[in-house]
């Protein structure tokens, strides 16, 4: 059986600006009907990578292939209009003087006898049948986004590039439009590269996430793997708030106020950080006579005082000042529980849901987080 090449293959792309490397050895592949998300903070060169693939910017090193055929290297370059690439932008970029149907038909040859049939088909698929005579200013933001999607898909591109396409939409509309867009893109069979800075969007839409930082891909994989096996503290912090306990590894064990934790792979005497997401910090109601006994993986309970509790809808975020050192830890708990400041509670940590990183690496990660968010 013949193995089909990736629909899009990016090999070792580098780009320099003013003597500074802004895209640094970026490589990935995307198969037909698959969605890869370039995820990262503003300024990490996600959009620059997208522009190089589209052909509106040029790399200083590396190659790009589409269906196994060379698209560009540092010498050869297929013009952007011949790359069969669709583009969707944050601002939709619809032509205000053209009707909806004319916008969708813009990338189709006027000599194509099936031109208007393709337009009608796509408008029906994005639930805009009967809107062809309207103009962009007569549409809502969500409707404009669907017109932009139909226009991008009209020429049946091999590759679809999407640069923060949902960020201009009202938050209550985003999830539904994301799901509809994803369904249509997969039906069309294009390889999709989505750029976003929102972890929720990446996990909702992507088959694979490529997490970028300072122009490099620091981790690639399925959303489940990036969330549950982050490569470093900065990667973990990109997806949620974190609680951090510091300690010293002794014989693959580290003592904390919550008992001993396994810290394998760290030298004896190495400073480590044990990282816990707020949803894995548990309240031991049994200390107050109100609940089941802790399970073995929950560690030793430690005493904390509630400093603040915020109702978040599906859950509550409760902050504690810990007795042992006054540090602040956060717990995500069911929304029905909203303790008052000053309440004393006992907390436990899920040992099996912790991440352990070298303290030195964590210091670097803090700098990376700060730089990325600037």
Image (spheres, rainbow, N blue to C red):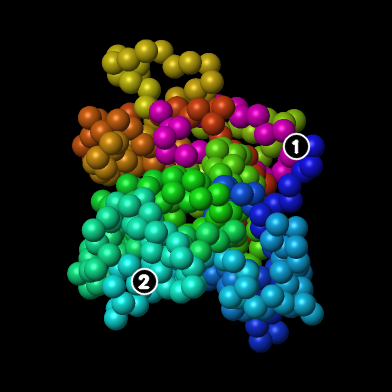
Asked whether residue 32 appears in the rendered view, the answer is yes
Q: Nearer the viewer, residue 195 or 269?
A: 195
On the image, the x and y values in percent for residue 295 come to 48, 16
Q: CA distance from mark 1 to mark 2?
A: 58 Å
* Disc number placed over residue 137 in the picture, else none: none
List the residue tagged with mark 2: 103
- Who comes first in sequence, dot 1 or dot 2? 2
Side of 72 relative to 194 (left or right): right
On the image, the x and y values in percent for residue 300 come to 49, 23
Q: Please, what secondary structure does the residue beneath circle 2 have? A: helix
Side of 77 relative to 128 (left or right): right
Q: Please, what secondary structure does the residue beneath circle 1 have? A: loop
Tell me the residue at 42%/35% (across/down): 279
Tell me the residue at 37%/13% (across/down): 292
Within 10 Å of disc 1 (Cα), the crowding (few <14, some 14-19, many 20+) is few
Q: Nearer the viewer, residue 347 or 2?
A: 2
Q: Quick check: 152 above or below 57?
A: above
Asked whether residue 246 appears in the rendered view, the answer is no
Extent of the magenta region: 258-282
Tell me the residue at 30%/19% (across/down): 288
Tell me the residue at 33%/52% (across/down): 124
List the residue tagged with mark 1: 265
Side of 301 relative to 44 (left or right): left
| Magenta residue check for 268 | yes
On the image, the x and y values in percent for residue 355 come to 59, 38
Q: Residue furthest front?
A: 113
Nearer to us: label 1 or label 2: 2
| Magenta residue check for 168 | no
Image quadrant containing the N terminus: top right
Within 10 Å of disc 2 (Cα), the crowding (few <14, some 14-19, many 20+) is many
């Amino acid at each position: 059986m013949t193995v089909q090449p990736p629909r899009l293959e990016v090999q070792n792309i580098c780009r320099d600006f003013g003597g500074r490397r802004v895209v640094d050895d970026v490589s990935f592949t995307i198969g037909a009907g698959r969605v890869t998300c370039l995820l990262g903070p503003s300024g990490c060169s996600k959009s620059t990578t997208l522009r190089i693939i589209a052909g509106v910017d040029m790399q200083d090193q590396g190659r790009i292939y589409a269906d196994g055929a060379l698209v560009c290297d540092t010498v050869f370059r297929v013009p952007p209009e011949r790359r069969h690439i669709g583009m969707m932008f944050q601002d939709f970029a619809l032509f205000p003087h053209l009707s909806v149907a004319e916008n969708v038909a813009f990338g189709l040859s006027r000599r194509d006898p099936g031109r208007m049939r393709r337009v009608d088909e796509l408008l029906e698929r994005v639930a805009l049948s009967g809107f062809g005579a309207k103009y962009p200013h007569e549409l809502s933001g969500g409707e404009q986004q669907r017109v932009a999607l139909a226009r991008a898909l009209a020429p049946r591109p091999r590759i679809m590039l999407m640069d923060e396409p949902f960020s201009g939409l009202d938050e209550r509309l985003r999830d539904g439009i994301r799901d509809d867009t994803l369904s249509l893109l997969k039906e069309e069979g294009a390889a999709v590269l989505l750029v976003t800075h929102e972890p929720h969007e990446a996990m909702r839409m992507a088959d694979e996430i490529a997490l970028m930082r300072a122009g490099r891909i620091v981790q690639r994989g399925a959303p489940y793997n990036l969330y549950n096996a982050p490569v470093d503290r900065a990667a973990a912090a990109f997806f949620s708030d974190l609680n951090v306990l510091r300690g010293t590894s002794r014989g693959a064990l580290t003592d904390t106020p919550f008992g001993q934790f396994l810290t394998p792979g760290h030298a004896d005497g190495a400073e480590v950080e044990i990282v816990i997401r707020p949803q894995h910090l548990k309240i031991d109601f049994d200390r107050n006579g109100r609940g089941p006994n802790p399970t073995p993986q929950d560690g030793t309970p430690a005493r904390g005082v509630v400093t603040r509790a915020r109702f978040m809808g599906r859950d509550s975020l409760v902050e504690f000042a810990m007795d042992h050192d006054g540090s602040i830890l956060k717990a995500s708990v069911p929304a029905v529980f909203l303790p008052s400041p000053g309440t004393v509670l006992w907390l436990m940590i899920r040992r099996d849901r912790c991440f352990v990183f070298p303290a030195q690496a964590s210091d670097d990660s803090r700098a990376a987080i700060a730089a990325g968010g600037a």
